[in-house]
Image (cartoon, helix red, strand yellow):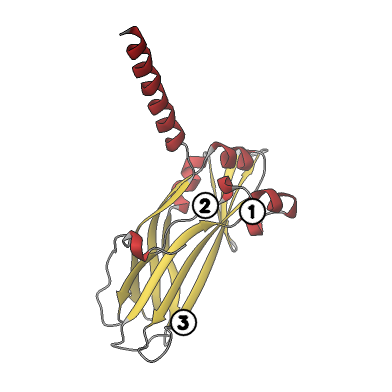
Amino acid sequence: MRCCGRIDKFILCLVLLCAVVAARAADITVDSAQLTASDDGYSLSADFGVTLNPRLEDAVNKGVVLYFVADFEVTRSRWYWFDQDVVRRSKTFQLSYHALTRQYRLASGALHQSFPSLDAALRVLSHIRHWQVIEKGEISHDVDYAARTRLRLDPSQMAKTFQVSALSNREWSLSSDWLSWTFSSSDALSSHAPVPAAEEAR
């Protein structure tokens, strides 16, 4: 009986340890996406969940810049040939830490924001808003299109001293699944849930 009790305690500790490790695993999830029409075309708003593991957090805190890329694509189905690529857009976000100011910085192009904590910076990174992804005239009226979006960590943009180890290390391999939906220019576009596993593409 004592032996069984020890085994049960060991299994319980192992389960708890696995739960803690899983909770600290790096991950990006995609929750929803929405296209909004305007006079200039369409803009994308999307919600993601971004979790960094201790290795990535440590890298940021030591001054390593992490590059996150949001991808957006639109295709048109053709029965007589392969699908037509209509739109491909990418937007890069740079996440960094400045030891002198003790501030985390999130930058995209000429725009940047500073934050007192890493969690605050990741919350803003998780919510992409009003990103112009389709210009006026790029899609036709009353035609069905397939759109998809994702968010990923891109080690290839890091400093060359880190690229070799980062690209070969699974802890640096971080990407959400693609979230896909169909739309036409006459639709009232709304939020969309993640696609089934069979339709996911990395």
In this view, 187 is above or below 202: below
**Circle 2 residues within 10 Å: few <14, some 14–19, many ≥20:** some
Residue 27 position in % (x across, y down): 46, 47
Quadrant hosting residue 149? bottom left
The residue located at (36%, 66%) in the rendering is: 199
On screen, residue 186 above or below 131: below
The residue pinned by badge 1 equals: 167
What quarter of the picture does the N terminus occupy?
top left
Tell me if 118 is positioned left or right of 193 in this view: right
Dots 3, 2 in contact, CB < 8 A: no
Closer to us: 57 or 100: 57
Specify the label residue 174 is tagged with.
Answer: 2
Q: CA distance from mark 1 to mark 3?
A: 28 Å
Give the numbered dot on residue 85.
3
Amino acid at dot 2: Leu
Which amino acid lies under the numbered mark 1 shown in the image of this protein?
Leu
Q: Residue at x 58, y 57 (%)?
A: 154
Q: Earlier in the sequence, mark 1 or mark 2?
A: 1
Please provide percent x and percent y for residue 135. Answer: 44, 81
The amino acid type of the residue labelled 3 equals Asp
What residue do we see at 37% from left, 13% from top?
6
- In-front residue for pair 7/171: 7
Residue sitting farthest toward the bottom: 80
Element at badge 1? helix
Asked if disc 1 and disc 3 are in contact, CB closer than 8 Å, the reply is no
Who comes first in sequence, dot 3 or dot 2?
3
